Image (cartoon, grey):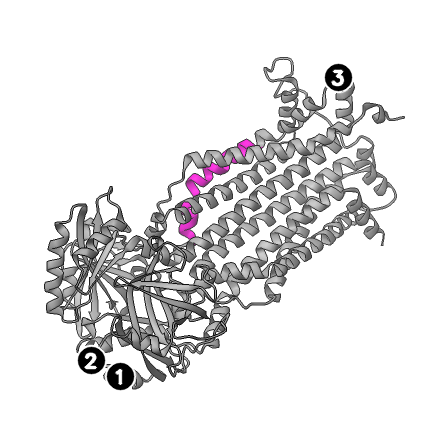
Amino acid sequence: MGLLLIARDNIRRKKGNTFLFFLLVALSVLLLYVGISVVTNIDNVIDSRNAHVNGADYLLFTGSSHTQEIAEILKEQKETAYMEREKALYATGAKFYKEGEKAADADQLEFFFFEKDAARKLSVIQIIDEGKEWNDNSVLLPYYMKTGMGYETGDVLCVDYKNQVYQFQVYGFTEDVMFATPNNLPAVKCFISADAFAAYSDAWDKDMAYRVKLDKGYDTAEFSDKMQDVLSADIADYQQVLNWTLDYSTMRTGTGVAANIFMGILTAFAVLLVLISLVIVRFNIRNAIEMNIRNIGMLKACGYTGSQLRRASMLEYLLTGLLGIGAGLAIAQSASGIVGNIISASLGLQWDMGADIRSAAISTAAVMVLILAAVYISCRKYKKITPLDAMRNGMHSHNFKRNHVPLSTTHLPLHAAVGMKHVLLDRRRTLAFGGIVALLSFCAQMSFGIYDNYAVQDRKLIEVTGFETPDITTAVKEADPKKAEVLQAELEDKLYAVDGISHIVAYTADDVTCTYKGGKEGVNCDAYDDTEHLRIDNVVEGRRPKLDNEVMLSTVIADRLGAGTGDVVYLKLGGSRQDYLVTGLSQGMNHLGKKAMVTKEGFARIKPDIVPELYIYLDEDKDVPSMVNEIKGIVKGKDVTVTNFLDYISVSLGSIKSVMKVLCIVMFGAVNLVIALILILLVKTQIVREQRQLGIYKALGCTTRQLILQTTMSYIPVVLSGALFGSAAAWFGTEPSLILCFSAFGIKKCGLDMNIGAMAAIVAAIVLWAWLAAVVWSMRIRKIEPCRMIEEV
């Protein structure tokens, strides 16, 4: 009971310090709980949403005319538990916008349209925010378009395809892990009425969708790779048509990758805040011992031991920590709707996770164990204090030779010089505070660097994902390979005559199997007729392929197979298998890093009938939208799709950019809040400790303004030094930190451009914010009156 009374009196006597520690613990636990709960539950939520609609394990979209043969092949596979097929309409590179918005600002993606009332057992429709009445022009959109693009039930969606605008009224939204977000798959899955489906069948491309549910125990990615080989070998026109193959395990990983990465960063930041809290604990305890050393001596003289006083301090911080943890968890739970909306915008799925007891327990246990350990270590000084030490106020000796800022010779103003003496007097406090500011400055600079490179600008984010970025693409829709090749050649000749086009690269891609020394991996293989004039440089070792027997592998595939530059690997598509020399390694998050690159001639060795797209690169002074319109005029009347690729890829990466923005805002706000809290704690403590000395200064004629300058000068040099050191660390350490976060995708370089002007502005903002907090709290010096400070002996 006696220890509890001591702990209670300590809390009452240090209300301000206790409250600031309480806030810091609450903020740490809030961020830690959110990060842990999202990272540990994201796969479960995705699985839950997929089970809610009985999602397919394997999905194939193909324009092949051999529909019955494909269905039979899929059914007869030993892994197949159930298979169904359904007609679909396909609009490649369609532009879309909300009624009332400018058509010139339209986004661009692929569209798949299904008949709403068609019979299906897999990937069934579960409507979210259902409208009042279903009409012939009604449409069901993916949930991402609600959370990530701002569409609402009742809005009118305008789809511009082949110079014809189609209008649909939004009836509601649906979920499908395969089509959850555009960054996972740059396509929109919609459901329309039977009348609309029939009316648009002649104007839009037709596909057949095959959905397969596998028996338990089979890997969906392996099944997808297997079917790629089987269908390529057994279906006559399979390699001549456009095919989309999706499997659940791959799409599940891709759906959660952005949220996983950035919540991991948020969790690391929360851990940093916990460590800062431990430094504050140590400072509070040392300060409390120095300020109350006489009382401690009296307690020891009355029979209390150092261990008992240590337990009293542990009880004090245990109570405060538990209250802070409770407040943090309560705030996290009350803000779960906001967090859910942010995660839903990234996933394209409803975040239906309730309170996570496991994450709350982990957060509580981790924070409390660290706090109690820090208190236990910091309270060792209790054992060294004797009643005699307390009578001397803890002073033993002082070395008067160490006078770092002599007042008689310094050129600084008197009170600025006294402030600098405070900085150098308590070196441990100065180093601890400077270290905290440096860490927070590093976080602030890193968050802004991520925001500037990946959210404000698209270029760096595109480079990390590994997408090649032409300005415009064209695709010939002719099914006959020979006719398509003639049309492609005519189109290329006409395009080269257009003023403003720098160069053109023919491109195609397909899923192939790569083998090396018994190892086998499915990869998405890109093929270019000119690998030297690509815009994105994602080569991390060696070079791109130049000859028809050369290949460049991604770092992910190279690591899994154990292959490297100079090795010979085999690529297989259908019944064709050829050897290739590895000339280089590339990086990229596209297709989860499972990529390869060959020349067009090299790809023809395993797929002879190639009808590539054309990647068009413009001169720097040319306007892309106007050039798109000019090229559309050239191909008018021909079945050729023209796409503004940069707009297309920007929409695809929209969810990643939105998560980055939120992450950077949260981190930057937390940094400023923590700096303010720590400064308030330090300034308040200094004023209390030096109250008599400040009273003497006032009695000698010093003004409040001069004493405020003296107090702020005790901290501003430390803040400036810490901010500069943290910024220097961010300059060199941001890219390695991101490479570590993206290491699962084989990323070896990020190519970040840290803006030196913005970094200087952030340093200035941190110093200015710290100065403002110190000045505002130092205003309490005004209340000090020398007459009231006279102490009768």
Q: In this view, does 580 lie above or below 382?
A: below
Residue most extreme to the top: 408
Residue plotted at (21% across, 44% down): 619
Q: What element carries label 2?
A: helix
Q: Is mark 3 on a helix, strand or loop?
A: loop
**Residue type (three-letter) at the residue carrying disc 3:** Gly
The residue depicted at 83 percent of the width and 32 percent of the height is 391
Residue 737 located within the stretch drawn in magenta: yes
Which residue is the site of mark 2? 234
Against 487, is 205 above or below? below
> Which of the marked residues, 3 or 1, is nearer the chain's N terminus?
1
What element does badge 1 sit on? helix
Q: Can residue 701 be seen in this view?
A: yes
The answer to whether residue 549 of the structure is visible from this angle is no
The residue segment tinted magenta is 719-741
Image location (x, y in percent) of residue 653: 38, 56
